[in-house]
Amino acid sequence: MKIDIKIKGSAGHGFTITPAIHEYVTKRCESFAKFLQHDPNALVTVELSKLTEHQKSGDIFSAEVHILAKIGGKSSDLYSSAERADLYAAIDAVKDEAFEELSSTKAKNTTLDRKAGAEVKNILKGIK
């Protein structure tokens, strides 16, 4: 699994990726490994940004996760995003959302595989 961390938009708004942020994002993305362990080419792209327009007061941070991988034997392209007043809270929220999406996708693909396998087994037995 490869983790790519980027700043979305212009970096001139006083927002850069520090080693602490990089380590925090990497630790949070490691929870995806159990879903992506069978795909060595899995790509997790994390985009962080500081929104500068259309808010009344304070900073708003955005975190987005884009996952390209084979999950449950099928290629998947998953996207999650979150906006919070704190960068670390945005990272946690998007991690939770992406984790739920990964879990759901794996469950759906596994169920479809089992149904297809049962159908083939029934055909081979001559039941249908």
Image (tube, rainbow, N blue to C red):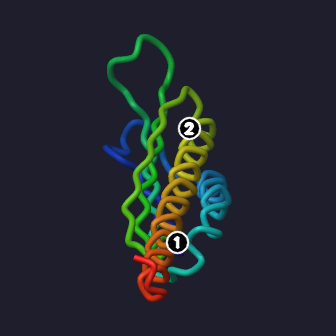
Q: Which residue is mark 1?
A: 114
Place of residue 54 in the rendered image (x, y in percent of width and height, measured from the top left): 33, 18
Q: Residue 119 lies in what quarter of the image?
A: bottom left
- Which residue is situated farthest in the front direction here? 127
Q: Residue 88 lies in what quarter of the image?
A: top right
Gap between marks 2 and 1, in whole Å?
36 Å
Neighbour tally class for label 1: few under 14, some 14-19, many 20 plus, Cα within 10 Å: few
Task: From the viewer's perspective, tell me whether residue 26 is left or right of residue 61.
Answer: right
Instruction: In the rendered view, tell whether residue 22 sits above or below residue 125.
Output: above
Place of residue 92 in the rendered image (x, y in percent of width and height, measured from the top left): 62, 43
Q: Which residue is mark 2?
A: 90
Place of residue 85 in the rendered image (x, y in percent of width and height, measured from the top left): 55, 26
Instruction: In the rendered view, tell whether residue 55 sits above or below residue 111.
Output: above
Query: How many marks are shown on the rendered structure?
Result: 2
- Which residue is situated farthest in the top direction here? 56
Task: Say whether disc 2 or disc 1 marks the residue closer to the N-terminus.
Answer: 2
Mark on residue 62? none
Instruction: In the rendered view, tell whether residue 100 sits above or below residue 39.
Output: above
Instruction: In the rendered view, tell whether residue 12 sits above or below residue 55.
Output: below
2 or 1: mark nearer the eye? 1
The residue under the point 51% across, 83% down is: 40
The residue under the point 53% across, 75% down is: 1
Place of residue 71 in the rendered image (x, y in percent of width and height, measured from the top left): 48, 70
Neighbour tally class for label 2: few under 14, some 14-19, many 20 plus, Cα within 10 Å: many
Under mark 1, the amino acid is: Arg
The residue under the point 48% across, 78% down is: 117
From the image, which quarter does the C terminus lie in? Answer: bottom left
Under mark 2, the amino acid is: Ala
